[in-house]
C-alpha cells in the first residue's frame, strides 16, 4: 500500500499558513503543556488530554485543529530516531548563494526530495560565508553526497562555495519545552 | 530495537505517521483502517516503537516562534583539548535544546529555545561568558521548508 493513502498526507509543496498566531489563551497553553512531551496512545487522545487540563475532548480537538490551522502546530506526527531507521549519515549542507538569488533558489532547493529543513541564515564574514542551509539524511555519506550534488547543480552559478557538515555526535537532544511558570503567565 | 525488528506493517505505520495524524474524533482508528489493521494493534505497535526508541516521540510538533518563544541556531569553534568541558558548560544551559558535534572549525552547533524572543540575547551572552568563546548566532531569516520524512 502506498503511503499516499495516509489520512493526513499533505498536499505536495504545502507550506505553513502565513498567519500571525500570537494570542494563545490559557486553555491553549494548558493543551501545549499537556502534549509537548507526546500525545496519549489511547483511542480517544483528545478526551485523555481534556481530563488532564479540565476541558472536554471535543474542545481539545477543536483547539488543536485551530492551532494547526494557524501554524502553531506544524502537525501531529511520529518523530523518528534517524539512526534507528538506518539514516546514519546526517549532513547539514551549507551554501554561499548570491543574495539576489537566494530566495528563489532556497524555495527550489527546499522542494528537492530528501531535504528535511531549509533556511536562509546570516553570514559571519570572513569565517562563515554560507547563507543557505539544507539538511540531508542518508544511509551513507555517499548517499548524502549524491543528494548534495543535485542541490549543487540546481544552485548553479549563483553558488560560490559549499560544505557538508556531518554530525559526529549528539551532545544533547531535548524537545522544545514551555515551562509551567510561563504557562501560567 | 532496530530496523531488523520492524515488520512490513511497522514500516507502513512509521511512513504514514511521519506525515501526520488526522485531527478527528478517533484519529488512530482512521489510520488503522487505512493500514488495514485494528485500532488496538496500531496503538500497541506505536507504543512499542516509541518505547523501543525507533520513534523519538509521537505528538504535536509545535512551532516555537508561533508559540511566542525565541529560537536560534548557534555555533562555537571549540579547541579540541577543551571540548568536553565546553560541552558540559553549554549543555548545562536549559535554553540549549539540541547540541551536535559537527566536523568543521565551527565544531559545536546548538539550538537555543527560549520563552521569549528577547531571552535569546541573554542566553548567548551567558554562554559566551561561561565558555570564553564567541558565539556565532545564525537565526533563521527565512524558512523555506521543514518536513522531516525518513521513509523505511
Image (tube, coloured by chain):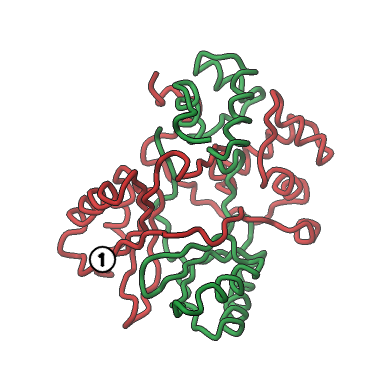
**Chain letter of the residue beneath label 1 in the structure image:** A
Residue B6: % across, % down: 48, 27
> Can you say which quadrant of the picture contains the C terminus of chain B?
top left
- Residue situated furthest left in the rendering: A157
Residue A6: % across, % down: 47, 25
Q: Between A108 and A18, which is closer to the camera in this rendering?
A: A108
Q: Is residue B44 left or right of residue A185?
A: left
Instruction: Check the rendered structure and report the hue given to chain A.
Output: red
Residue A56, quarter of picture: top right
- Residue situated furthest front in the rendering: B81
Q: The chain shown in green is which?
A: B
| A5 in relation to B74, above or below | above
Residue B13: % across, % down: 50, 26
Q: Secondary structure at mark 1?
A: strand
Residue A145: % across, % down: 25, 52
Q: Residues within 10 Å of mark 1 (few under 14, many from 20)?
A: some
Write down the residue under mark 1. A162
Q: Between B97 and B86, which is closer to the camera in this rendering?
A: B86
| A127 in relation to A19, above or below | below
Residue B142, quarter of picture: bottom left
Q: Is residue B32 left or right of residue B94?
A: left
Residue pictured at 54% horizontal, 40% vertical: A75
Amino acid at each position: 500500500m502506498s503511503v499516499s493513502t495516509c489520512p493526513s498526507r499533505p498536499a505536495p509543496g504545502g507550506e505553513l499558513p502565513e498567519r500571525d498566531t500570537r494570542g494563545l489563551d490559557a486553555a491553549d497553553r494548558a493543551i501545549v503543556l499537556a502534549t509537548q512531551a507526546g500525545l496519549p496512545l489511547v483511542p480517544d487522545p483528545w478526551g485523555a488530554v481534556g481530563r488532564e487540563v479540565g476541558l472536554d475532548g471535543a474542545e481539545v480537538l477543536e483547539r488543536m485543529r485551530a492551532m494547526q490551522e494557524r501554524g502553531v502546530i506544524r502537525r501531529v506526527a511520529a518523530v523518528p530516531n534517524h539512526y534507528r531507521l538506518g539514516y546514519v549519515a546526517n549532513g547539514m549542507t551549507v551554501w554561499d548563494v548570491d543574495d539576489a538569488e537566494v530566495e528563489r533558489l532556497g524555495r527550489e532547493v527546499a522542494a528537492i526530495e530528501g531535504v528535511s529543513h531549509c533556511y536562509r541564515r546570516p553570514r559571519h564574514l570572513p569565517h562563515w560565508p554560507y547563507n543557505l542551509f539544507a539538511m540531508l539524511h542518508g544511509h551513507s555519506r555517499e548517499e548524502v553526497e549524491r543528494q548534495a550534488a543535485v542541490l549543487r547543480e540546481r544552485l548553479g552559478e549563483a553558488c560560490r562555495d559549499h560544505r557538508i557538515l556531518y554530525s559526529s555526535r549528539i551532545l544533547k537532544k531535548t524537545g522544545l519545552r514551555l515551562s509551567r511558570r510561563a504557562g501560567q503567565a | 530495537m532496530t530496523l531488523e525488528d520492524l515488520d512490513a506493517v511497522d514500516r507502513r505505520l512509521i511512513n504514514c505517521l511521519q506525515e501526520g495524524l488526522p485531527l478527528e474524533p478517533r484519529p488512530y482508528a482512521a489510520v488503522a483502517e487505512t493500514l488495514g489493521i485494528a485500532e488496538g494493534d496500531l496503538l500497541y505497535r506505536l507504543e512499542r516503537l516509541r518505547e523501543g526508541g525507533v520513534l523519538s516521540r509521537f505528538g504535536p510538533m509545535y512551532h516555537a516562534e508561533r508559540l511566542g518563544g525565541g529560537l536560534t541556531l548557534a555555533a562555537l569553534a571549540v579547541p579540541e583539548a577543551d571540548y568536553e568541558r565546553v560541552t558540559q558548560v553549554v549543555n548545562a544551559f536549559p535554553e540549549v535544546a539540541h547540541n551536535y558535534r559537527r566536523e568543521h572549525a565551527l565544531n559545536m552547533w546548538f539550538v537555543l529555545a527560549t520563552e521569549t524572543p528577547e531571552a535569546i540575547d541573554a542566553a548567548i551572552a551567558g554562554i559566551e561568558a561561561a565558555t570564553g568563546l564567541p558565539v556565532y548566532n545564525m537565526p533563521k531569516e527565512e524558512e523555506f521548508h521543514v518536513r522531516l520524512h525518513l521513509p523505511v
